[in-house]
Amino acid sequence: QVQLVESGGGMVQAGGSLRLSCATSGLALMYYGMGWFRQAPGKEREFVAAVGWTGDTTTYTDAVKGRFTISKDNAKNTVYLQMNSLKAEDTAVYYCAAKGGLLVPATSPVEYDYWGQGTQVTVSS
């Protein structure tokens, strides 16, 4: 049974940093591409960042380029999203997602097979 559990969310002031973690179980993370998405109240779920299964290729939405970094630690079965220089518009519930054999990072939620329950990030201005 595949499980993804996000943690690390919270409340932070604008300009601050948070690191989100996505602990995985029931899958071999080294063979999975991973993504982070977010959903703000009243808005559609949107793509944030993704990494291919090799860990060598990443992609980001323009709004977070240069501020967020996605990485995966296969030994710890965990994926991270380091978020720096946070802005009020980054406030949302953040979700991690997994897809087996995904070499090229995917930006569409329909590409992913497994999802976590989400973690709230609130940035105060």
Image: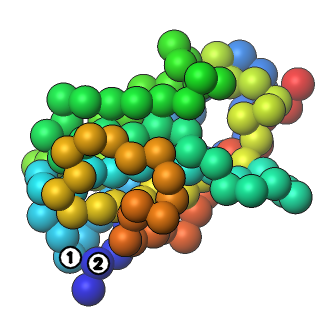
User: Residue 86 location, x and y as percent?
Assistant: 68, 24
Asked if the residue under mark 2 is in contact with the one under mark 1, i.e. CB atoms within 8 Å, the reply is yes
From the viewer's perspective, is 86 left or right of 109?
A: right
User: Residue 21 location, x and y as percent?
Assistant: 41, 48
Residue found at x 64% / y 48%:
46
Residue found at x 18% / y 70%:
27
Give the residue type at disc 2.
Answer: Val
Mark 1 falls on what kind of element? Answer: loop
Of 2 and 19, which appears nearest the observer?
Answer: 2
From the viewer's perspective, is 22 left or right of 94?
A: left
- Colouring: rainbow
Q: Which residue is mark 1?
A: 26
Labelled disc at residue 2: 2
Of the image marks 1 and 2, the number of the one nearer the N terminus? 2
The answer to whether one can see residue 74 in this image is: yes
Q: Quadrant of residue 81?
A: top left
